[in-house]
Amino acid sequence: MDASNYRRVPSAVVAPRDADDVAAVLAVCRERGVPVVPRGAGTSIAGQATGVGVVLDFTRHMDRIVSLDPEARTAVVQPGVVLDDLRAAAARHGLTFGPDPSTHSRCTLGGMIGNNSCGSHSVAWGTTADNVAALTVLDGTGARRRLARGWDGAPEGLRPLVDGDLALLRTGYPELPRRISGYALDALLPENGADLARAFCGSEGTLGVLTEADVRLVEAPRARALAVLGYADESAAAEAAAGLLPYGPLTVEGMAADLVREPSQKSGLPKGGAWLFVETGGGSPAEARARAETIVRAADALDAQVVDEPAGQRALWRVREDASGTATRMADGSEAWPGWEDCAVPPVRLGAYLRGFRALLADHDLRGTPYGHFGDGCIHVRIDFDLLSREGVARFRTFSEDLAELVVAHGGSLSGEHGDGQARAELLPKMYGPELVALFERVKDLWDPAGLLNPGMLVRPAPLDADLRFAPLPREPVDVVFGYPHDGGDFSAAVRRCVGVAKCRTATAGSSTAVMCPSFRVTGEEEHSTRGRARLLHEMLAGEVVTDGWRSTEVKDALDLCLSCKGCRSDCPVGVDMATYKAEFLHHHYEGRRRPAAHYTMGRLPRWLRAVAVTRTAGLVNAVARVRPLAALGKRVGGIAAERDVPEVASETFRRWWGKRPGVAVGRPDVVLWPDTFTDHLSPSVGRAAVAVLEDAGLTVALPPKGVCCGLTYVSTGQLDRARAVLRGTLDRMEPLLDAGTPVVVLEPSCAAALRTDLAELLGDDPRAGRLAASVRTFAQAVEELAPRWRPPHIGRATVGQTHCHQHAVLGDAAERRLRTKAGLTGELSGGCCGLAGNFGFERGHYEVSKACAEEQLLPSVAEAGGDAVVLADGFSCRTQLEQLAGVRGRHLAEVLAEGIAARGAVAAGDDTAVRDQGPGDR
C-alpha cells in the first residue's frame, strides 16, 4: 500500500545498492515477464507506488547526495534522497530545492520526479519538472539513457512520433500551472526545446527507472513574512487568490473555517470564514514585511494580519498544516479518503470551480472540506466515501466520473500535484480525448516494449474502483478488549486510520518536541514504523498474506520493537495509537498460552513490589541484586536484559513515610496524591517532594486507599484481563473520593496517561472510569489550577532533560512549561523518547535499540549542558536511563521545587518578615 486507497501484493521487494543492481533486476524481470515498480517513501496518493511483481525500494541504499555545486546551484542525487536532506545540505549555502510537498521530511527525489510533485511554494519556484536539469534512467529494455534538453538519449522512434503529431501536441494540453496529468509530451515540441528530462517527469515509473538526477537549486529568501487574509467564504478567498500573483508571493494557500476546530480568535486567525496564507520573502525582515503589507493593501479582505516573527509564523502555519490531518476525519469522526485529492483548474476559475464542486458533493450526498494551493488553482480534499460496501464503491465511481467532467469543463487537470496513478488514469480520455491518450500508449510502448514498468498506471489503466485496500477487510466488528471510542468500537476502523502519509518514517523526530517513531529512527526498517505496523495489522485482519490472525509471528515481531511511547497518538496526523493496538494484539496473541518471562516479572511489577514492602525484604532484594552471579541468574530467568542494572527498591515506601507523618489532614482534602508503583516503591523522594510543594502552596493532601493501581504494566504487556480487574478494584476503592470530586495528582506521567486514556477505553461501560480519568492532574496542572496565587521558589538555573513521551502524547506539558518559567528554570527540554519506556528497555533483546533511542536527543542534550544545569526528568524510566547510560541523576520537577522551598525556608529562618503577613495561598 501507499497513501492511496489501493493495495497490491508484490512477489518481492528489492533494495538496490546501485544502478547495476537496478539493471540486474530489470534483466531478470524481463526474462520472467515480471512487472517492476519503482518506489520511494510510498506516500503517493493515487496508487502508483503499489504493484505486483518486484517493487524497487530506493530508500534503503540509493539515498546519497552525489554532489552539490553552490556556484552552479545544482546537485546530483540518487532517487532515494529525502527532500529535507537535500534542503539541509543546500541551506548551508543559502540555497534550497524549490518544490516542497507537505511530506518533505520523508518523500524522496525519485518519487517527486515520478509524480512531478509541487508543494506550497510552486507559485514561486514551479513544479519538480521546472527544477530538473538532467536524468539518468534505465528504460524497459534495460538501456541506460541520459535525458536532458535535446533528443540525445531518446528511445528510437520517439522523435518521429512527436514530429508526426505536432498539431495534436500543440492543441491538446490545457494551459494551467498545475497540469500534472498524463505524459508531458508537449515538453518535446520544438518551441519548448525538446526537453526529454522534463517530459520524463510525472511518468510515474511507467517509462523508465530513475537512477540519478541533476536538479537545480534556488536562492532561499533570507527573511520571510506571512500575511493572513480573512474572507467571507472559500469562494471569495479563491477568487481573490489569482489577483495576488502579480505581487510575487512565495505561497498563496487557502482554507475554510470548517477545517479549524476552534474559534478563529483562539487560533490567532483574523476575522473571516476562510483565509489565504500569503508568504513573502526578502533580503531582510523589513523588506519581507513591506511586501506582505503591499499584498494586504491590494487584497480586498475582510480582515488581515502580517506576522514577521518566526515563532508567530510557525504557529499560524501550523493551523494551515493541521488541515491535512483534520481532513482525514470529518467533524463527527467519520472517515474520509483520498482519490480526488488534488484536482487543479486555472487560478482565475477556482472560485467558480469550488462552487460547482460543493454542489456536486451535495448531489452525491458526500462531504469534504477543500483546502490547498489556491494560488495555483489546486485543491486538496478528503471525501467521506464509503469504500466498504458495494453501493458505496459504486458511488465512488459515479462521483469520480462526474467530477472529472466538472474539472475538464473548467479547463483543469485531473491531477494537480500527486499524479494520476490508478485513481484518475482511467478518466484521462475525458481530459485529453482518445487521440492524445492513444499517443500516450504508443510512447509507453517505445520506452517499455514488454509493458513491465508499473503496469496499470497512466496508460491502459486498471479500473479506478479495483484493488481497493479495504476490500479484503472483515465487515463484522472484531472481538476486542479496548473500546476504541473514537472509531465506533471497531478495531478495523482503528487500523484504517493509517492512510500512509508516513510522518512516522523520518530520520529525525522532526521538531524539538516530537516523539514518533523512535524505533524506526533506530532501525530504518519499514516494519518498525507506525505505518509498517499498521499495515501488518491490516494484513492480519485481511487474512490473505498474514494468515494466522492474532497468532501471527510477523505481526508480533514488528510490534516487539514498539516502545509503546504513544508518540503516534499525538504526532501522527490521523491519531494512530500503536501502543493500544500493541497491547490488544499481545492480549490475543498470548491468550491461553505461556507468555515471555518479562511479562510475569515486569508486567506484574506492582504485585512483586507490594510483596517486598509487606515482607520488608527490600534490603535483601537489593543485596541479592548486587551479587553479580545471582543478579545474572535472576535477569536470565526473568527475561531482563543482561546489560541492565536492576533498580534499587526503597527501604521505606512513600506510603510508609506518609503513615509516620504527624498531623495528618482531617476533613475533605484539596488533592489526592496518587502513590504510583514507581513513586511508592522505587523513588519515594519524588512523593515526599510533591507533598512539600503542594503543602507550601496551601493545599491539603490525602492519599487514596491502599490497593489502587493504574494498571500500566499489565496494559503494556497485553495482560488486559488482569488490567481490567485491577482497574475495577481501583474504581471501587476510589469511589468515595470520586463522589467528592477531589482532583487526583499523579506524579508519574505514564501512570497519569494510563488513567486518562487506558482506563476509560478498557472500562468504558463503567461511568466511574470517565470520572476518574477527568479528575487526573499532573503535578504542574494541579498547582496551576488549585493554587494560582502561589509563587514557586526562584531557582534561577538552566534546565535540560526530556519531556516524558506519554506527557507529550496524552497530557500536554503547557502547565509544566509555565511553572518552570515562574521558577526561573530556563531552557527547553528535548523531545523523542528516552528509550527505556517502562518495561521495554529492560526486556532481553531490546537493550541496543533502547540505548540508541536515548542517544538520539536525550543523552546529547545532557552532555552538552553546562555543569550548573538542572537535569529534569519527571518519568522514572527517563531518570533510570539517564543514570544507567550517562551516570547522571535526573530529578522530578517536584524535587527541584522542594529543594528551592527548603532553601528559601532556611534563608527566611533568619528573618521571616518577608513572608510573615502572607496567607498560605500567597506564598
Image (cartoon, rainbow, N blue to C red):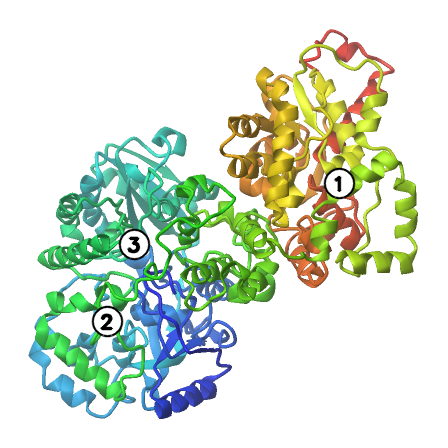
Residue beneath disc 3: 388
Question: Percent x, y for residue 9?
Answer: 39, 72
Q: SS class of the residue under badge 2?
A: loop
- Identify the residue under disc 1: 607
Q: Determine whether 885 is above or below 736 in the image.
A: below
SS label for mark 3: loop
In this view, the residue farthest toward the front is 592
Residue 265 in percent (x, y) is at 37, 29
Q: Residues within 10 Å of mark 2 (few under 14, many from 20)?
A: some
Looking at the image, do the residues carrying marks 2 and 3 touch, with CB atoms under 8 Å apart? no
Which label's residue is closer to the chain start, 1 or 3? 3
**Pointer 1 with pointer 3, Cβ within 8 A:** no
Q: Quadrant of the N terminus?
A: bottom left
Give the side of residue 835 with respect to residue 637, left or right. Answer: left
- The secondary structure type at the circle numbered 1 is helix
- For badge 2, the amino acid type reads Ala
Q: What residue is pinned by disc 2?
A: 462
| Chain-order first, disc 2 or disc 1 | 2
Place of residue 543 in the rendered image (x, y in percent of width and height, measured from the top left): 43, 64
Mark 1 belongs to which amino acid? Arg
**Residue 188 locus on image (x, y percent):** 20, 80
Q: Which residue lies at the image location 25% right of the left edge and 79% below the top edge?
A: 195
Cα distance in 3D space between marks 1 and 3? 45 Å
What residue sits 61% from the left and 54% below the top? 592
Confirm whether residue 901 shows in the render. Answer: yes
Q: Amino acid at mark 3?
A: Leu
